[in-house]
Image (tube, rainbow, N blue to C red):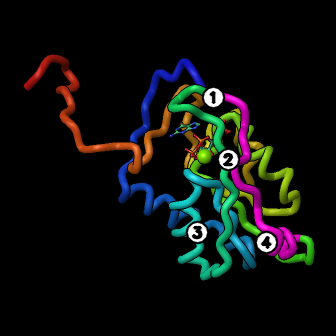
Amino acid sequence: MSDNQKSFPVSWDQFHRDSRALAWRLMGQGGFDAVVAIARGGLVPAAIVARELNIRVVETVAVKSYDHQAQGQVQVLKQISKPVLDVAANGGRVLIVDDLVDTGATARAVRDMLPGAHFATVYAKPKGREMVDTFITEVSQDTWIFFPWDLDVAYAAPISGGTD
Ligand SMILES: O=P(O)(O)OC[C@H]1O[C@H](OP(=O)(O)OP(=O)(O)O)[C@H](O)[C@@H]1O
Ligand SMILES: Nc1nc2[nH]cnc2c(=O)[nH]1
Ligand SMILES: [Mg+2]
């Protein structure tokens, strides 16, 4: 992702609320037998959704495609374990959770591993939106979302410019 003009910083409180809202929306999709978090960004929303929906089988798939804000190749650093693939193969319902979908490249790679699974993210950008079954908030393609685990409390200059 290059050319981002806008920034969308998300606090812990807002992220918790948005992840809970995702869980509420997923309630209407019937039960799930297992959740797969796309690490690292999907770990926090997957934990919140698993808690709200009482899903006790929690698995990870580790995918990296960005170095800071520069997109590279999708690299799968840890695969989904066989017991969870077997849940899906035996007709169980698997939920995949990530923090966001941007271009959709990560979502496409993980969907290929679990074709029948339900794919959910907290945030979505237009290019990747079609890859997601359920999401909460859409932001424009030229926005970079800053998550609370990447932020610190810092001085902010007045909107009018200069210093106060
Ligand atoms: O739709 P895409 O263009 O593929 O981008 C979305 C992915 O990018 C980020 O992960 P990243 O690769 O930065 O790794 P991280 O989860 O460890 O931060 C984010 O968590 C999504 O998984
Ligand atoms: N933190 C963060 N990671 C991303 N990976 C792809 N798009 C984004 C984004 O907007 N924010
Ligand atoms: Mg990620």
Tag count: 4
The residue pinned by badge 1 equals 71
**What amino acid is at disc 4?**
Val
The residue pinned by badge 3 equals 23
**What amino acid is at disc 1?**
Gln
**Crowdedness near tag 3: few (<14), some (14–19) or many (≥20) residues, C-alpha within 10 Å:** many
Q: Position of residue 155 (x, y in %)?
A: 18, 34
Q: Position of residue 114 (x, y in %)?
A: 84, 59
**Residue at the front extreme, as displayed:** 77
The residue pinned by badge 2 equals 63
Confirm or deny contact between disc 4 and disc 1 (CB under 8 A).
no
**Residue 13, quarter of the rendered image:** bottom left
Q: Which is more N-terminal, label 2 or label 3? A: 3
Q: Is residue 53 above or below residue 150?
A: below
Q: Which is more N-terminal, label 1 or label 2? A: 2
The residue pinned by badge 4 equals 84
Q: What is the spatial separation of the Cα atoms under label 2 and label 1, in whole angstroms?
A: 12 Å
* Region rendered in magenta: 71-88
**Residue at the right extreme, as displayed:** 90
Helix, strand or loop status at disc 1 = strand
For the N terminus, give its image quadrant: top right
**What amino acid is at disc 2?**
Val
Mark 1, ligand 1, within 8 Å: the answer is: yes
Q: Position of residue 83 (x, y in %)?
A: 81, 75
Helix, strand or loop status at disc 3 = helix
Left or right of residue 76, residue 40 in this image? left
